[in-house]
Amino acid sequence: MGIKQDIETFLAESGWNSSRLAKTAEVPISSITRLLNGKRPGLNTKTYERIQAVIDAYIPIPPPENPPQDEARA
C-alpha cells in the first residue's frame, strides 16, 4: 500500500480527520490534504516518516490467533 492509501485507511478506521493526523504528526495540514486530493504526488521523507509513525503507533496490533499455552496448565 502507498502512503495515500495508508492515510485513507487510517482516517476511515480511526475516525480521525486529516487535521488531527497533521497536528499529531506535526506536519502541515496542506501536505495531507493535497496528497489526498491528488494535487501532490507524494511526500518528502521527513513528512512521510512522521505520518507513518503516527499511523503505526495508533494501529492496534491484533492478538496472535493461537496464543501459546502455559505448559504448567496443560
Image: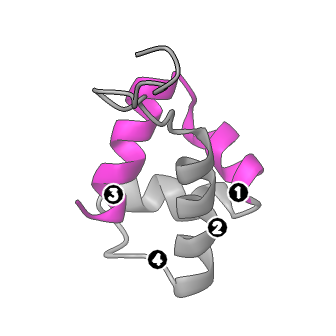
User: Tag 1's secondary structure?
Assistant: helix
Q: CA distance from mark 2 to mark 3?
A: 14 Å
- Residue 4: assigned label: 3
Amino acid type of disc 3?
Lys
Q: Secondary structure at mark 3?
A: helix
Residue 73 is left or right of residue 57, and the answer is: left
Q: Is residue 37 magenta?
A: no
Of the residues under marks 1 and 3, which one precedes in the sequence? 3
Which residue is pictured at 52% across the width and 84% down the height?
A: 44
Sequence-earlier tag: 4 or 1? 1
Residue 27: x and y, percent?
A: 70, 64
State the residue position of label 4: 43
Specify the amino acid type for callout 1.
Ala
Q: Give the position of the N terminus as an image quadrant.
A: bottom left
Question: Which residue is found at the position 68% from the left and 63% from the top?
Answer: 28
From the viewer's perspective, is residue 41 above or below residue 63? Answer: below
Q: Are marks 4 and 3 in contact (CB under 8 Å)?
A: no
* Secondary structure state at the residue bearing disc 2: helix
Q: Secondary structure at mark 4?
A: loop
First to last magenta residue range? 1-25
Q: Say which quadrant the C terminus sits in.
A: top left
Nearest the viewer among 68 and 31 is 68
